[in-house]
Image (cartoon, rainbow, N blue to C red):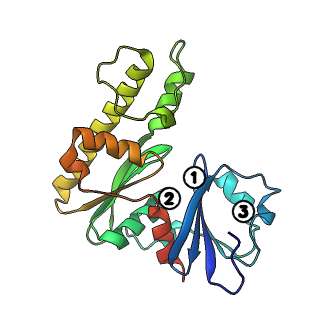
Amino acid sequence: MRPNQDENYWLGLVIGNSRLHWGLFLGKTLNRSWDTEYLPESVIPTIFPPHVPLLLASVVPSQTALWETYPQVRIITLDQVPLLGMYPTLGIDRALALWGAGKTWGFPMLVIDGGTALTFTGADANQVLVGGAILPGLGLQLTSLGQNTGQLPLLESQLITSLPPRFALNTPEAIHSGVLYTLSAGIKSFIDGWWSLFPESHIAITGGDRTLLVNCLQLQFPELAARLRVEPNLIFRGMSGLRS
């Protein structure tokens, strides 16, 4: 889609650790979203009409630099996100997702992002950052085993379609079992810990592995999974609220 100049279209771009995440907006309404691989610098000036505003949030400084010369670009920084108590190195993607989730469903809010890294980020009823945690995501854990051991295969998370047997009888399923059951137990532990602090809090889950992670939680902890808000575009919800 190539937006017309007389329409109130704008682009949101989130530069993640492994991909570019795009959102096309009409006013404050997200028209569509999609993902691409990183783009070569030579292509960037040609992919969209130069009159279309671009809001950019990035966790990859080298990629950010490629987009700084794009016409009408605005780079979102932490000081523009209306959360309190943020520390300087908090990822802008985590802050935007938390802000978007909180403004959609209310605070307190905990956001779980199942991306390249699996992150937990929470704020209280006063929109003050409580804190969070970061660990390797599903794909990173599989890659680490495949690349740093002598005999274990390199597996891809996209090939996992269901929760494997807990006690597997072949190597690929044993890897899937170890990673998925441990991730599920860890997610449950963080959720239980959050609800002990904020019993009525909403919890949202986003990120590329969100569907698989939610399916695993539904099979093991159905009552917990039923309370999760599943939303692929939390960061864009946060972006939309910041654009004036």
The three-letter amino acid code for the residue at tag 2 is Asp
Above/below status of 187 relative to 167: below
> What residue would you read off at disc 2?
93
Q: CA distance from mark 3 to mark 1?
A: 14 Å
Residue topped by disc 1: 16
Q: Give whichever of 67, 155 is nearer the camera.
A: 155
Look at label 3 and name its amino acid: Trp
Q: Which residue is mark 3?
A: 67
Which of marks 1 and 3 precedes in the sequence? 1
What is the x, y in percent for residue 32?
A: 55, 66
User: Which one is earlier in the sequence, the residue at label 2 or at label 1?
Assistant: 1
Neighbourhood count class around disc 3 (C-alpha, 10 Å): few under 14, some 14–19, many 20 upward? some
- The 10 Å Cα crowd at callout 1, few under 14, some 14 to 19, many 20 or more, is some
Image position of 60 (left or right of 216): right
Q: Are marks 2 and 3 in contact (CB under 8 Å)?
A: no
- As drawn, is 11 to the left or to the right of 95? right
> Is 143 on the left-hand or right-hand side of 230?
right
**Residue 187 pos. (x, y %):** 30, 43
Quarter of the image for the C terminus: give it: bottom right
For the point 35% across and 71% down, the residue is 104
Q: What distance separates the C-alpha of mark 2 from that of mark 1?
A: 8 Å
Name, please, the residue furthest toward the right.
Answer: 42
Q: Answer with the quarter of the image where residue 174 lies.
A: top left
Report how many numbered discs are placed on residues in the image.
3
In the image: residue 38, left or right of residue 100: right
Tag 3 secondary structure: helix
Name which residue type carries label 1: Gly
Which quadrant holds residue 75? Answer: bottom right
